[in-house]
Image: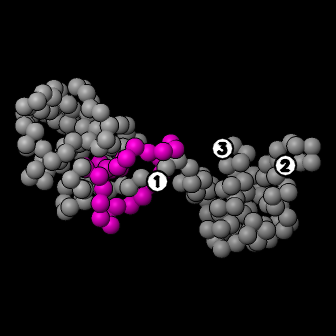
Amino acid sequence: MHHGDIWRGIDLLAAKHGLTPSGLAKLAGLDATAFNKSKRVSPDGRLRWPSTESLSRALEAVGGAFRDFADLIEEEQGVALPLLDFAEARRGQHFDELGRPQGDVWETTHVPGETPDEGLFILEVSDSSLMPVYRDSDRLVISPSAQIRSGDRVVVRTQGGDIQAYEMRRRTKNRIMLVSLGSDRASHSLTPADIAWIARILWVSQ
């Protein structure tokens, strides 16, 4: 964490509990000015950091832990993306005809970056069906707009509504060859008419 991250985290911690930085300092038994903006940089321009004791007392005062503090900072960084359990994605109409998220069942999480691809979303693996490639709790960051090449890992929705992850083996005008990511590595041959949409798995957050 950088200097600005720590101070921003203190501001976020205070706001989360309906306090000003000064109010948080007083609640923690510190001088009311301990977390003021004027205390963050010295008159000669040197960066000042809050002491570990001050931060610890602030967290104790609101019933938090350092992990909660770190999560608070990380959640404010990056871009917000819709998140859905992979099993839930197979149920209901949670995507439009282009494979972009729709409906109100999606949660929101943050990932590194600035501007996401159009329609970017995350599916969280919730079983062992994609082992050994993906494990339970892995989060797949998926783009319906990214170009797909042979060897890429993809999520496919068929016209019948099934949603599954595969490796793209080959794609021609009349045939799409896929390989399952599960331990059986089974091959599948589909026509373009069989498929509602294909989206590329860009990376996995583990």
In the rendered image, the quadrant that contains the C terminus is: top left
Residue topped by disc 3 = 1
* Residue at mark 3 to residue at mark 2: CA–CA distance: 17 Å
Q: Secondary structure at mark 2?
A: loop
* Residues at discs 3 and 2 in contact (Cβ within 8 Å): no
Q: Nearer the viewer, residue 122 or 184?
A: 122
Does the stretch in magenta take in 139?
Answer: no
Q: Secondary structure at mark 3?
A: loop
Give amino acid for label 3.
Met
Give amino acid for label 2.
Val
Magenta stretch, main secondary structure class: loop
Q: Quadrant of residue 191?
A: top left
Give amino acid for label 1.
Ala
In the rendered image, the quadrant that contains the N terminus is: top right
Residue found at x 49% / y 49%: 79
* Residue at mark 1 to residue at mark 2: CA–CA distance: 31 Å
- Mark nearest the camera among 3 and 2 is 2
Residue found at x 8% / y 52%: 160
Residue topped by disc 2 = 41
Q: Secondary structure at mark 1?
A: strand
Q: Nearer the viewer, residue 60 or 38?
A: 38
Q: Looking at the image, is mark 1 or mark 2 earlier in the sequence?
A: 2
Q: Nearer the viewer, residue 196 or 204?
A: 196
Q: Looking at the image, is mark 3 or mark 2 earlier in the sequence?
A: 3
> Are there few (<14), some (14-19), or many (20+) residues within 10 Å of tag 3?
few
204 lies left or right of 92? right
Q: Which residues are magenta?
A: 99-127
